Amino acid sequence: MASSQEKQADRESRARVDKFAERRAELGEAALQTLAALGYARTSLREIAQNSEFSHGVLHYYFSDKVDLIVCSVRQYKARCVTRYDRVTADAASYEEMMEGFLRALGDTLQSEAHMHRLWYDLRAQALFEDAFRADVRDIDQSLERMVMRIMTRFSELAGVPLAVPPSVLYGVIDGLFQQYLMRHLSGDAGAVDALRADARLAIDALFGARVAARADESLGCLSRPLRQPAQGS
């Protein structure tokens, strides 16, 4: 059985590790704006230090190199991203309500956080060339795929239509559309946000909408059918 001194030493050790991790998270968050503005190729620890309140020495103490810092920063940002649609999926009571909420959030993040998303795609592209990025990029990609799957599962439930497409395909469709319109938005296309919403609706309706429209037509047909008149003398 561990002595009280050993237990105390263990608690102190864990506290130091937690404090170190918290400090890394704080520095990673502070570096996000500079990283998003400059991208991987044009960013160094020294450049980040010059654009933040932290010294180059402090950054070098907590991060081995800029790869370590960029991965930390992007992981934190994407960890927030994967919860962006949780409220939409929880609150939606109908297919159309889910659609409106999802498209609104999708367009809003393209418009307000374009540079952050650009950093993610920059990191993912670098993973094609640098082994150091690959494991982290794969983990982030998998978390985003699970996010898309949660969204599509809710659409499926509200539509009453089973999902017939695997998660990798669903993620590929939504991510591909988002990256395409991110490029257009960053290039100054004023219609990119609305076009993204329109194409995302088209893609989702292709999976579920025909069945939803048919059910709506059936309901309207029932409502418009004349009531049977009772037979004379009954």
Image (cartoon, rainbow, N blue to C red):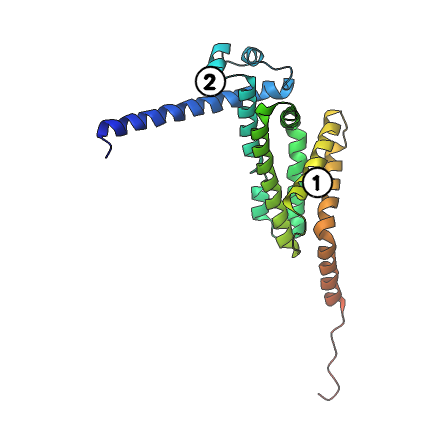
Instruction: Judge from the rendering whether residue 14 lies leftward or rightward of residue 194; answer left or right.
Output: left
Q: Is residue 94 visible?
A: no
Q: Quadrant of the N terminus?
A: top left
Mark 2, residue position: 62
Residue 38 x %, y %: 64, 17
Pick the residue in front: 224 or 165: 165
**Residue type for callout 2:** Tyr
- Residue 202 at x, y percent in the picture: 75, 45
Q: Position of residue 10 (x, y in %)?
A: 31, 28
Residue placed under numbered mark 1 in the picture: 173
Q: Earlier in the sequence, mark 2 or mark 1?
A: 2
Left or right placement of residue 40 versus residue 6 in this view: right
Image quadrant in which the C terminus is located: bottom right
In the picture, measured across the screen, residue 224 lies left or right of residue 158, that is: right
- Residue at 75% over, 86% down: 232
Please name the amino acid that badge 1 sits on. Answer: Val
Q: Position of residue 87 (x, y in %)?
A: 56, 43
Q: From this viewpoint, is residue 214 visible?
A: yes
Q: Residue at x 66, y 40 (%)?
A: 171
Circles 2 and 1, Cβ within 8 Å, touching? The answer is no
Q: Secondary structure at mark 1?
A: helix
Residue at position x 34%, y 25% from top?
13
Q: How many marks?
A: 2
Give above or below for 58 relative to 11: above
* Distance of label 2 from label 1 (alpha carbons): 37 Å
Q: How dense is the environment of label 1, judged by Cα within 10 Å: few (below 14), some, or many (20 and up)?
A: some
